[in-house]
Image: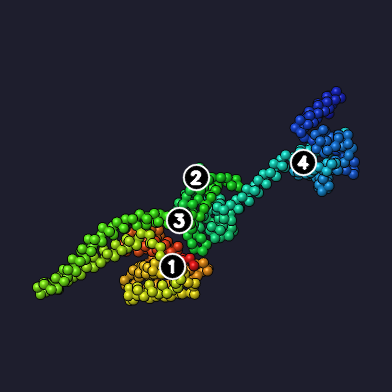
Amino acid sequence: MRQRRHEASPSADLENENEVQALAEAVLEAASVAGLGVSVSFDDGAAPRNIYVNEAAARMLGRSVDELIGSAMLLNFAPEERNRLLELAMRWQRGDGGSSLVETVIEQPEGGRVPVEVAFTTVTLSGEPAIVTFLRDISERKAADAALQQSEHRFRQLIEAAPDAIGVYQDQRLVYANPAFAALCGRPFDQLVQREIREIVHVDDRELVAGRTASASSSQPAPLEYRILHADGRVVNVETVSIPIEYEGRAAVLGFTRDTTERKLLQAHLALRDRMAMLGMLAASVAHEINNPLAYAMLNVEAIIRQLASQAPEGVAEALEPAVAAARDGLARVASIVRDLKGLSTPQSAKRWPVDVRDVLESALNVAMHAIRGSARVERHYEEVPALETDPTKLGQIFLNLVFNAVQSFEPDAADNVIVLGVSSPHPAEVVVTVSDNGPGISRERLEHIFEPFFTTRTMGTGLGLAICQTLANALDAKLGVESELGRGTTFTLRLPA
């Protein structure tokens, strides 16, 4: 092949030169159609100078073709870019340029700056090395990139400022959490990212949440309700809406989470209020229907007792005494239940006056002392609190029910039973009273229903005491809550507005 080239005739060499020239012209024409700027420069020892510049390059450089011919190509670039480009051009000319595509900036005579993509290559013209420069205007791409970055920045600002907790999950791990999510969990960002989501979810809800976060194949708009564990030990009710997304090139699940604790409390309060309203109407009717026959029965039992004492043969009264006593106790219990039913109706407004909560609590404690004595000891933790303008009768009834409830929670043969009474004022607008016991505690399933009428954890209870307490608390504009843990006891908290 080489031998044949050496033996080629002058006409063949001329034909080859014509073909090369035609090819070069075709390449230049294609570059112009594609909007590529092309320039050819010779190095005169000082700097590469243009011997050819096409119209596309002239437009980018902001000069005419005639102005550019003979000028130093590097002078058309931004001053801060010239040394870098000269070094790159020299390296490419030596054949060790590495990457042949760089981004730089053209500075036009009027001061305009045009971002361009530049590629250098070297050719031999008339036996001398020449530098061919290709220019591409990337202004639109840069503007699009800037717009995309600005959009991403605004989107991130929106996510960061969102009131709802937002998290991104991959492989059961949290890979992103906004500040609202961190606040919801009570943990800083660095303690959440790359943490398994199950670690902050209530143990009973982990399988449920794992199934949701593992599914990223289809949209699941239905909200998922579960509980998370706050850093301070609280259990927070939340609901999450999850959608599949792509995050950093991988499948992920985006979750929007909202704290529903207050909403659940409000729903429970409204449901209880509706139930109380219905029971109030029912109680009035039932009490009326029961009271009359109850009065007859009690009068007749008392008459039987008197007749047995005066007319029965010797020994008969003594033999019937247990049965008569049982009948009397049963009727007294029915009368007590009727009174409790009446208490379920919304209490009538009463006059209020300033009272010391500690005095009311001590009065209730004195009434219940016969039940406490021998069953438990009492600890008092009283702080100085402001006097409250309230109804001491209703307040005392609440305290009495809560103390009795604590006494009845203890096992008969348990030792070291303690009832702890606390009075404090966390801030001037509120007085807090707590009644705690170290009894067996209440399970979470039962705790959700503890204030419902007729719900009881004791075999002999009517389930009305705590429901009445809730009704009385509402009448006093107070909030009654409960916390309990199996094996560790129960605490009722009454928050009274000062």
Residue at point 88% right, 36% down?
A: 67
Q: Measure the C-alpha gap from mark 4 to mark 1.
A: 82 Å
Which of the labelled discs sits on residue 116, or is there none? 4
Query: Is 237 drawn above or below residue 308 in the view shown?
Result: above
Label 4: few (<14), some or many (≥20) within 10 Å? many
Name the quarter where the N terminus is drawn: top right
> Are circles 4 and 2 on residues that touch, CB within 8 Å?
no
Q: Measure the C-alpha gap from mark 1 to mark 3.
A: 26 Å
Which of the labelled discs sits on residue 179, or is there none? none
Q: Which residue is mark 1?
A: 352
Q: Nearer the viewer, residue 242 or 451?
A: 451
Amino acid at dot 4? Val
Q: Which residue is mark 2?
A: 221
Mark 4 / mark 1, whichever is N-terminal: 4
Circle 3 sits in a helix, a strand or a loop, which is it? helix
Amino acid at dot 3? Leu
Amino acid at dot 1? Arg
| Residue 295 place in picture, x, y as percent | 23, 64
Mark 1 / mark 3, whichever is N-terminal: 3
Mark 2 / mark 1, whichever is N-terminal: 2
Residue at point 77% right, 35% down?
A: 36
Residue at far left of view = 313
Q: Nearer the viewer, residue 417 or 397?
A: 397
Amino acid at dot 2? Pro
